[in-house]
Image (cartoon, helix red, strand yellow):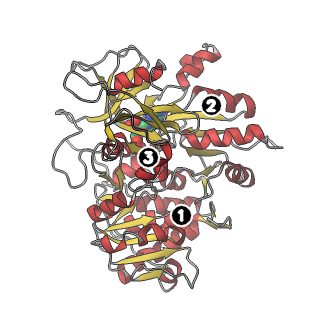
């Protein structure tokens, strides 16, 4: 027997409607790339989303199921795009601005974006690849001066697009399982893969994060959204702010620690998000130049890479600001776990409490975790037995965009994360390693395989193996170990950096090189990265 409850679709438009009806007075503040501050209310956002919906359908001919790209920083128009695009039944596809031209071209062609909304300051990155983009019919320029010059064909200014449109728009009735957004993950081997979020997954993910057991967001908060909108839909924050009634502060490209501190102070920000590299920078800057008045900031939520224990401790001791660790993936919307203490931990020592907070944490209600050992057995929840972390739940991917194969999934329907973890008796998961051959530096992925094949194309190099090593600022950075064709040859680091800069962007290029006689191999002849990491840890690679 079915329950006798309305089938009320959980869509992004219901979030927007709710935000407008209950929190129309709440603020969206943007710091534009040139530092200018702009402010309006959720009520204004609502009206502008409706104008945008009219423009998308009437002027740009966007219909249900169309893919619409964004290539932009965090700012109010980008939030309007999140709601406007998915509201008309199309799919909002934020494109990572930090990828190589090849990756960006691949992603846009693969997703079949019909229109791209692009920040004026980012236009040069698209100009380079525009002739290769097969499906893009038009570019909409955001924050561009009237006389802005570009080689992009068929452009229109965002404000001009909205200006002519009515504030009245009847949202179409959408199926909550329809796609609402898409982000590509480069956290996999091979080509980037599209992850298609649904309205329902977006709604459930956002409404869960608000809980006091998770992000703890309410209408008393002002949240600084540092996580880029092109990273997993900004971790769902543009949605959750409308549900919780939290003021939103959007920094666009103002991500330098000193500027972030100024924004935290001026806007009386109470909560914020970001990868560890951002918070390490903010902490160092605050240590060097302590703010005269205590910040309103109560806590910052960190994910993307492990939150160092020393940072949790330092921020709390020196400034009374709490670090909260979360774990997730593009494939999991992203948030899968969060680490907060519970009543059962009250009696523990400070150090024991810190050890728990430095774990990746417990699953959100709505997702389940399990750890499978190399032998294919379920690992006990003993906090010791390591294995691959697997996840399933209401906002976890069940297949990648445009792929029919089930690579990355178990036969019984769990998603294989590629992270190696333990889980303890209270359900706290801790990441120990990863099986993915990738390096995560400052929140962005670097493919070690791509670097190895590029290095091996150098005439003097016979073999190369790239591993991740720890770095204070970037958490991880690449180290390349190289075997030369001719032992007597030499190559300078700068020659290699120059060589790699043809195919890689700056943050992806290793600055550390070591020369070895032979790359260690496994029994089946693969590069033995574990052994290289061991040699490095023991100081035997130099
Ligand atoms: P992405 O899909 O780019 O968001 O990357 C997801 C991956 O980032 C995960 O599979 C982990 O390898 C890593 N990651 C995310 N959050 C954490 C965390 N809190 N601690 C350690 N690694 C993390």
Q: Secondary structure at mark 3?
A: helix
- Farthest residue to the front: give it: 488
Image quadrant of ligand 1 equals: top left
Is disc 1 placed on a helix, strand or loop? Answer: helix
Question: Measuring 21% from the left and 18% from the top, which residue is drawn there?
Answer: 375
Q: Residue at x 54, y 69 (%)?
A: 121
- Residue with the mark numbered 1: 20
Cα gap from disc 1 to disc 3, whole angstroms: 54 Å
Q: Residue at x 41, y 44 (%)?
A: 445
Using the numbered discs, state the Cα–Cα distance from disc 2 to disc 3 in whole angstroms: 34 Å
Q: Is residue 103 above or below residue 140?
A: above
Callout 3 environment at 10 Å: few (<14), some (14 to 19), or many (20+)?
some
- Residue 329 in percent (x, y) is at 39, 41
| Residue 411: percent from left, percent from top | 16, 33
Q: Which residue is mark 2?
A: 311
Q: Tell me, yes or no, if residue 181 can be seen here.
A: no
Q: Residues within 10 Å of mark 2 (few under 14, many from 20)?
A: some
Task: Look at the numbered disc 3 and say if its residue's Cβ is closer than 8 Å to ligand 1.
Answer: no
Residue 219 in the image, given as x and y percentages of width and height = 61, 50
* Mark identifier at residue 328: none
Residue that numbered label 3 is attached to: 496
For the residue carrying disc 1, how many other residues have a C-alpha within 10 Å: few (<14), some (14-19), or many (20+)? many
Q: CA distance from mark 2 to mark 1?
A: 38 Å
- Measured along the vertical axis of the image, is residue 470 above or below residue 248? above
Say which quadrant the N terminus sits in.
top left
Q: Earlier in the sequence, mark 1 or mark 3?
A: 1
Q: Is residue 68 left or right of residue 522?
A: right
Which of the two discs, 2 and 3, labels the residue nearer the N terminus? 2
């Amino acid at each position: 027997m079915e329950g006798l409850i309305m089938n009320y679709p959980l869509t992004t438009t219901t979030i927007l409607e709710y935000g407008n009806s209950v929190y129309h007075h709440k603020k969206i503040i943007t710091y534009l790339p040139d530092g200018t501050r702009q402010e309006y209310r959720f009520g204004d956002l609502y009206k502008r989303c409706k104008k945008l919906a009219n423009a998308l359908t009437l002027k740009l001919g966007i219909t249900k199921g169309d893919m619409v790209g964004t290539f932009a920083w965090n700012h109010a128009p980008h939030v309007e795009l999140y709601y406007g695009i998915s509201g008309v039944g199309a799919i909002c596809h934020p494109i990572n601005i930090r990828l190589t031209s090849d990756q960006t071209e691949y992603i846009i062609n693969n997703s079949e974006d019909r229109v791209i909304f692009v920040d004026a300051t980012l236009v040069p990155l698209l100009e380079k690849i525009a002739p290769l983009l097969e499906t893009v019919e038009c570019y909409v320029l955001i924050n561009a001066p009237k006389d802005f010059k570009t080689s992009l064909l068929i452009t229109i200014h965002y404000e001009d697009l909205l200006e002519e449109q009515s504030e009245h728009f009847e949202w179409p009735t959408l199926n909550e399982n329809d796609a609402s957004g898409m982000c590509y993950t480069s956290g996999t081997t091979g080509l980037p893969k599209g992850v298609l979020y649904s309205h329902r997954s977006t709604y459930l993910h956002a409404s869960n994060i608000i809980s006091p057991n998770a992000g703890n967001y309410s209408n008393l908060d002002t949240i600084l959204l540092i996580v880029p909108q092109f990273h997993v839909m900004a971790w769902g924050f543009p949605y959750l702010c409308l549900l919780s009634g939290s003021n939103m502060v959007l920094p666009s490209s103002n991500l330098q620690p000193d500027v972030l501190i100024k924004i935290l102070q001026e806007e009386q920000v109470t909560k914020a998000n970001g990868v560890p590299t951002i918070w390490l920078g903010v902490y160092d800057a605050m240590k060097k130049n302590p703010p005269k008045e205590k910040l309103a900031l109560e806590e910052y939520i960190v994910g993307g890479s492990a939150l160092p224990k020393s940072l949790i401790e330092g921020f709390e001791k020196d400034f009374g600001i709490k670090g909260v660790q979360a774990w997730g993936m593009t494939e999991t919307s992203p948030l899968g776990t969060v680490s907060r203490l519970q009543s059962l931990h009250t009696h523990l020592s400070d150090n024991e409490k810190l050890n728990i907070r430095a774990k990746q944490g417990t699953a959100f209600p709505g997702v389940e975790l399990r750890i499978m050992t190399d032998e294919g057995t379920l690992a006990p929840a003993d906090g010791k037995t390591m294995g691959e972390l697997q996840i399933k739940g209401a906002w976890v991917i069940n297949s990648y965009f445009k792929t029919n194969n089930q690579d990355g999934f178990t036969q019984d329907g769990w998603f294989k994360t590629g992270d190696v973890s333990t889980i303890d008796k209270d359900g706290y998961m801790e990441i120990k390693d990863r099986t993915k051959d990738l390096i995560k530096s400052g929140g962005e992925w670097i493919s070690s395989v791509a670097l190895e094949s590029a290095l091996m194309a150098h005439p003097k190099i016979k073999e190369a193996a790239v591993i991740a090593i720890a770095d204070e600022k970037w958490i991880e950075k690449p180290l390349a170990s190289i075997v030369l064709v001719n032992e007597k040859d030499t190559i300078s680091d700068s020659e290699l950096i120059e060589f790699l800069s043809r195919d890689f962007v700056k943050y992806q290029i290793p600055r550390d090189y070591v020369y070895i006689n032979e790359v260690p191999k496994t029994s089946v002849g693969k590069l033995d990265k574990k052994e290289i990491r061991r040699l490095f840890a023991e100081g035997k690679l130099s």
